[in-house]
Amino acid sequence: MSKTDLAFWLALYAGAIASATGLWSLFRELWLERARLSVTAIESWLVATTSGKPLIVRGEDSLKVMEVPVEARKPVLQIIIRNRGRRGAEILSVLQITRGGKHNVFGDLLPHLPREIPAERTKVLLIGHEGGYNHGEVSLRRFFVIDGASRIHPLRERYGQRLSRAPKPPEENLPQA
């Protein structure tokens, strides 16, 4: 094998390795190294304790076991925001989609936003911690957050909202039955 053949094959090998490395870096930047937020709403109870710091309790069964009197508990809605990604995210707003496609904005959450959520961490926000909330008043579905780059999380909600904003075909172009 001559030197020129060896140089050709070595250059071809180096080009393939460099392309694979570049593609892997791009994939990591776009998919792995991003904030991936999930939002969950859970109805809970805020229970006063002797230490002065309130305790969040989920479920009526837990309240019965703890023997908490009705006067010592308040109904609350927990909004659990979990960052499953490898980058931190700043939450600018927490909203909910209603049946008509309108957005619910919660006044209880506004003083606590914007909020930084580090990578692989969870933050809990409460609706009704100062009263004014009763279980069943708010649906537990379709909560979403908007981050500092104006992206909607979780992704299923982002794409669902895009589909709902897509233009509808005119009625006259539909085939007649």
Image: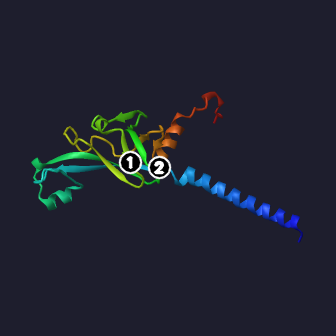
For residue 52, above or below residue 164: below
CA separation in Å, label 1 and label 2: 9 Å
Q: Residue furthest bottom?
A: 1
Q: Nearer the viewer, residue 123 or 77?
A: 123
Q: Position of residue 2 (x, y in %)?
A: 89, 69
The local crowd at label 2, few if under 14, some if 14 to 19, many if 20 or more residues have their Cα within 10 Å, is: many
Q: In this view, does 139 lie to the left or right of 35?
A: left
Q: Is residue 83 left or right of residue 112?
A: right
Q: Where is residue 30 in the image (x, y as percent from the top left)?
A: 57, 50
Graded by Cα atoms within 10 Å as few (under 14), some (14 to 19) or many (20 or more), the crowding at tag 1 reads some
Q: Which of marks 1 and 2 is nearer the N terminus?
A: 2
Rendering coords of residue 108 (x, y %):
27, 37
Q: Which residue bears the numbered disc 1?
A: 117
Q: Is residue 42 above or below residue 5?
A: above
Q: What element carries label 1?
A: strand
Task: Kindly indicate the quadrant of the structure image that contains residue 107.
Answer: top left
Identified at 88% across, 72% down, the residue is: 1
Residue that mark 2 sits on: 35
Residue 176, image quadrant: top right
Of residues 65 and 50, the one nearer the viewer is 50
In the image, residue 174 above or below residue 32: above
Quarter of the image with the C terminus in it: top right
The amino acid on which the numbered mark 1 sits, given as a three-letter code, is Ile
Q: Seen in the image, is 104 located left or right of residue 68?
A: right
Q: Position of residue 26 (x, y in %)?
A: 61, 52
- Verify CB contact (< 8 Å) between mark 1 and mark 2: yes
Seen at 45% across and 44% down, the residue is 153
Residue located at (20% from left, 56% from top) = 60
Amino acid type at image mark 2: Ala
Q: Which residue lies furthest to the front in this view?
A: 3
Seen from the viewer's position, the closer of residues 173 and 150 is 150
